[in-house]
Amino acid sequence: MKIIQTKGIIKNKELKVIVPQEVSNGEVDVIIVAKDEPDEFERRHQLMIEKGYDTPEKVVELIRQIKLEMLKEKGRS
């Protein structure tokens, strides 16, 4: 296995990269690291803030409410 780090350009949902000549033709695995794009955790975090869960205390209270609802559904409350 050979790991090569290079930069590429994404345009119209297509990725274009230039690789060194010593790399053979064939299928490769591609991992994209987009520094300016939020990951799934950051998206969820922003959504929680938008919904008003902007402090740790509010998040803990939300978790407590969800747990109580789950217990009610199981008939344990």
Image (cartoon, grey):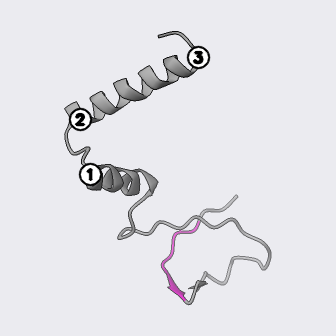
In the picture shown, does residue 25 fall above or below 41? below
Q: Give the residues in magenta.
A: 4-11
In the picture shown, does residue 36 fall above or below 63? below
In the picture shown, does residue 2 fall above or below 19? above
In the picture shown, does residue 17 fall above or below 59? below
Amino acid marked by disc 2: Lys
Dot placed on the residue nearer the N-terminal end, 2 or 1: 1
Mark 1 surroundings: few (<14), some (14-19) or many (≥20) residues within 10 A: few
Which residue is the site of mark 1? 49
Alpha-carbon span between mark 3 and mark 1:
30 Å
Q: Residue at x 58, y 64 (%)?
A: 31
Alpha-carbon span between mark 3 and mark 2:
25 Å
Which residue is the site of mark 3? 74
Which residue is the site of mark 2? 58
Amino acid marked by disc 1: Ile
**Do residues under tags 3 and 2 come within 8 Å of each other at their CB atoms?**
no
Q: Residue at x 66, y 62 (%)?
A: 2
Residue 40 horizontal/vertical position (percent): 45, 55
For this rendering, which residue is in front, 8 or 58?
58
For this rendering, which residue is in front, 38 or 54?
54
| Relative side of 24 to 2, left or right | right
| Relative side of 60 to 32, left or right | left
Dot placed on the residue nearer the N-terminal end, 3 or 2: 2
Mark 2 surroundings: few (<14), some (14-19) or many (≥20) residues within 10 A: few
**Do residues under tags 2 and 1 come within 8 Å of each other at their CB atoms?**
no
